[in-house]
Image (cartoon, grey):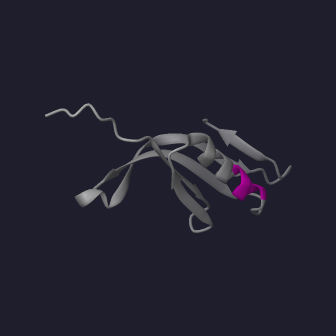
Amino acid sequence: MTTGCEPPELYSWDVDPGRECGVTDDRERAVGHVRRALADAPPGASGVVQRVQLGGVRGMRYVTLGVVGLARRDAASGDVVWTDR
């Protein structure tokens, strides 16, 4: 049976696992979180934004649907550099 309801778009973000992470319904907000976290991170640190949805038993975990963007803090310049976005 189809209800016609679409699941919300959700995006997870993670900077150097354990440093900073979160989930939001706004892609650009997730990108901004990664950008700000990497600006204060040591050179070489990295981050990722992924499209996710609730899954598992009773929707108690996030299932990754794909990578939206990858970023790193360049060791030489200190700039936040994105690949895929």
Taking the image as shown, residue 83 lies to the left or right of residue 59, namely right
- Residue at the bottom extreme? 18
Among the 4 quarters of the image, the one containing residue 38: bottom right
Q: Give the x, y percent position of residue 50.
A: 50, 46
Q: Does the magenta stretch include residue 72?
A: no
Residue for point 65% across, 55% down: 46
- Residue at the left extreme? 1
Main SS category, magenta section: helix
- Of residues 80 and 37, the one drawn nearer to the viewer in this rendering: 37
How many dots with numbers?
0
Q: Give the x, y percent position of residue 16.
A: 61, 61
Q: Give the x, y percent position of residue 29.
A: 62, 46
Among the 4 quarters of the image, the one containing residue 66: top left
Among the 4 quarters of the image, the one containing residue 18: bottom right
Quadrant containing the N terminus is top left
Segment tinted magenta in the rendering: 35-39
Q: Give the x, y percent position of residue 59.
A: 29, 56
Taking the image as shown, residue 53 lies to the left or right of residue 73, namely left
Seen in the picture, residue 17 relative to 13 is either above or below; the reply is: below
- Of residues 47 and 8, the one drawn nearer to the viewer in this rendering: 8
Residue for point 62% across, 41% down: 28
Residue for point 61% across, 35% down: 85
Residue for point 29% across, 35% down: 5
